[in-house]
Image: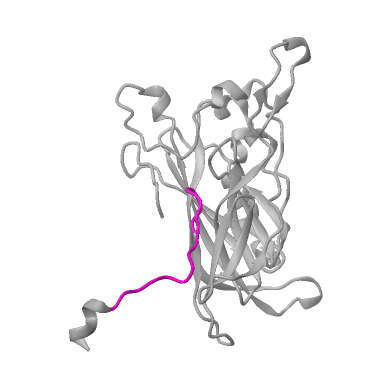
Amino acid sequence: PAANAKNLSYSPSSHLFLSKRGKFHLQPQGQSSEETFVTVPLGERFQILTISKLVPTLVSRALPPSSEHHRMRVMRSIDTSNAQYSGGDEEEMHQAISDSSLSVTVATHGPKLLGRAVSVTLYSRTRPLVCLDAFPFLAEKKTGRKNRWGIVDMINLGKRRMAMTGEKEGKMENTLLLAIVCARDDVVKTNKKDNAGVDVVGNDSDDESDDESDLAGESNAVTSSSSPSDSSEDDEKSIADSEKTPANDCYGRVLIVQASRTSMKIIKTVDLSGIGSNFIPHVG
């Protein structure tokens, strides 16, 4: 009754702790389940929990390492003749999106010391299958020293049907379509007085680490094409676009990623240039 409403109170029976960088993903109720699930990135793993009781139903394996040119090193020894380095190997997950019908999860992550997401990894339930480098062009020293790129958001665009290959050629399967929103910020270095740029999360210490880092690293996984043969040229073009260094006036990029149960690839690259001076996206 309204008269007793002032005496009513709500006390939560459980709570959920989130890291300062992690974004949780809420999965709607499936056709065969009345339970709602939430995917939460925690450190180098993700957990899937039930909303009703916040009980973990799945805990993933640890993240694979990002490409070598993203991994920063901190010098531990002053003696340059016998230099020793530490750090850069521990990964941190920033965002994870799960799909129960495909039993897959796509996560963005990067070295914890770097402080921003630079890689995209596909999980099949708990096991990582494919790891893509979102910024392979940063392996070049001349661009790696002056460009600070990071993944700022990941958007679930829904499902897309794709033709299967191999033994199941001719059949169609559902795939997950995602938009990976990326941003570049080197305005901090060129205009330190007013700091007009929107800062990509992380420490601006690229200049200090590039001399000690191995910048000749490659992506730690290569996706295999699972599209029909008539679209192979488009696949090659999309991969080439993602590896191409953006123009000087480009501070944003969107990667359209297609993920199936066994593979993941970049199918389109959209550079956010020519839409305004120093346009830097910070959310998708």
Image height check: is 162 above or below 189?
below
Image height check: is 236 above or below 167?
above
Image height check: is 33 above or below 23?
below
Look at the image and say whether residue 21 sits in the magenta stretch: yes
Query: In the figure, is residue 196 to the left or right of 205?
Result: left
Q: Identify the residue at image location x=55%, y=61%.
A: 40
Look at the image and say whether residue 100 sits in the magenta stretch: no
Q: Identify the residue at image location x=64%, y=20%.
A: 211
**Along the line of sight, the residue nearer the viewer: 27 or 264:** 27
Q: Where is residue 177 in the image (x, y as percent from the top left)?
A: 55, 65
- Of the 4 image quadrants, the one containing the N terminus is bottom left
* Res 259 seen here: no
Q: Name, please, the residue furthest toward the right.
A: 167
**Along the line of sight, the residue nearer the viewer: 190 or 59:** 59
Report the span colored magenta: 8-23
Q: Position of residue 38 (x, y in %)?
A: 53, 68
Query: In the figure, is residue 283 to the left or right of 33?
Result: left
* Res 186 seen here: yes
- Of the 4 image quadrants, the one containing the C terminus is bottom left
Query: In the figure, is residue 6 to the left or right of 116?
Result: left
Q: Identify the residue at image location x=50%, y=55%.
A: 18
Image height check: is 245 above or below 36?
above
Query: Where on the picture, by quarter, is residue 57?
Result: bottom right
Q: Position of residue 103 (x, y in %)?
A: 66, 72
Q: Where is residue 24 in the image (x, y as percent from the top left)?
A: 50, 61
Q: Main secondary structure of the magenta part?
A: loop
Q: How many discs appear?
A: 0
Please name the colour scheme applied to the rendered image.
one colour
Query: Where on the picture, by quarter, is residue 84?
Result: top right
**Along the line of sight, the residue nearer the viewer: 281 or 63:** 63
**Along the line of sight, the residue nearer the viewer: 223 or 58:** 58
